Image: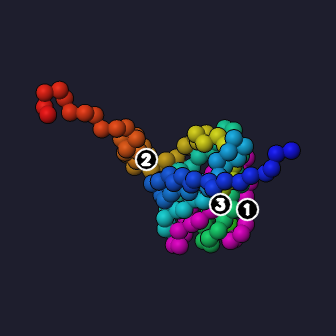
Amino acid sequence: MAEPSTSRVARRIVEKPWGREVFIAETPYYVAKIVYMDRNTTMSKHYHEQRHETLHFLTPECTLEVDRGPGQRESLSPDVGESFSIEPGMMHRIMSGPLGARILEVSTPQAEDVVRVEDPWKARRLVQEREARQKSVPAAPPPVGTR
């Protein structure tokens, strides 16, 4: 039998209009990240078609808004240390309080599975995505004859 092994995990940081996500594990089976929200900000209202999430709240004074179906919207005020399961198809969003927010999120690995229903950050998100693409593309060489 092979010896168990361990290795250091490289973390990945994704800037968001409302803060950032720090990925602490990305595997074919699960993803774990810490969500940092700036003070008094709101995520877009969204749902996932396949992804299942568990949210564990690390800071007080946040609001978790969930829609359990037509006319079944609920605003929850999680205590520090409280966890919530978000099933596929459940619309949700998080609003941070005056201290900002830190949330440990563990989910299935469908990273791109986000359907935004209300997105107050759309314009800013598009700029961030364009800037991220530009950083990953090497600069073009100068045109021939201009050196």
Q: Estimate how packed mark 1 is, as few (under 14), some (14 to 19) or many (20 or more) residues with alpha carbons within 10 Å.
A: some
The residue identified by callout 2 is 125
Graded by Cα atoms within 10 Å as few (under 14), some (14 to 19) or many (20 or more), the crowding at tag 3 reads: many
Q: In the rendered view, would you say 99 is above or below 139?
A: below
Bounds of the magenta span?
79-103
Outermost residue on the right side: it is 1
User: Relative to 2, does residue 81 appear above or below in the rendering?
Assistant: below
Q: Which residue is mark 3?
A: 104
Q: CA distance from mark 2 to mark 3?
A: 22 Å
State which tag comes first along the sequence, 1 or 2.
Answer: 1
Q: Secondary structure at mark 2?
A: helix
Amino acid, disc 2: Arg
The residue sitting at 49% across, 64% down in the picture is 38
Q: Quadrant location of residue 133?
A: top left
Q: Nearer the viewer, residue 80 or 121?
A: 80
Left or right for 83, reference 15: right
Residues marked 1 and 2 touching at CB (< 8 Å) = no
Q: Residue at x 62, y 54 (%)?
A: 9
Q: Residue 124 — which label?
A: none
Q: Secondary structure at mark 1?
A: strand
Disc 1/disc 2 C-alpha distance (Å): 28 Å
First reached walking from the N terminus: tag 1 or tag 3: 1
Q: Residue 123 vs residue 84: left or right?
A: left
Nearer to me, 32 or 60: 32
User: Which of the labelled discs sits on residue 83, or is there none?
Assistant: 1
What amino acid is found at the position of numbered circle 1 in the picture?
Ser
Classify residue 110 by image quadrant: top right
For label 2, count other residues whose C-alpha is less than 10 Å away and answer few (under 14), some (14-19) or many (20+).
some
Q: Is residue 98 magenta?
A: yes
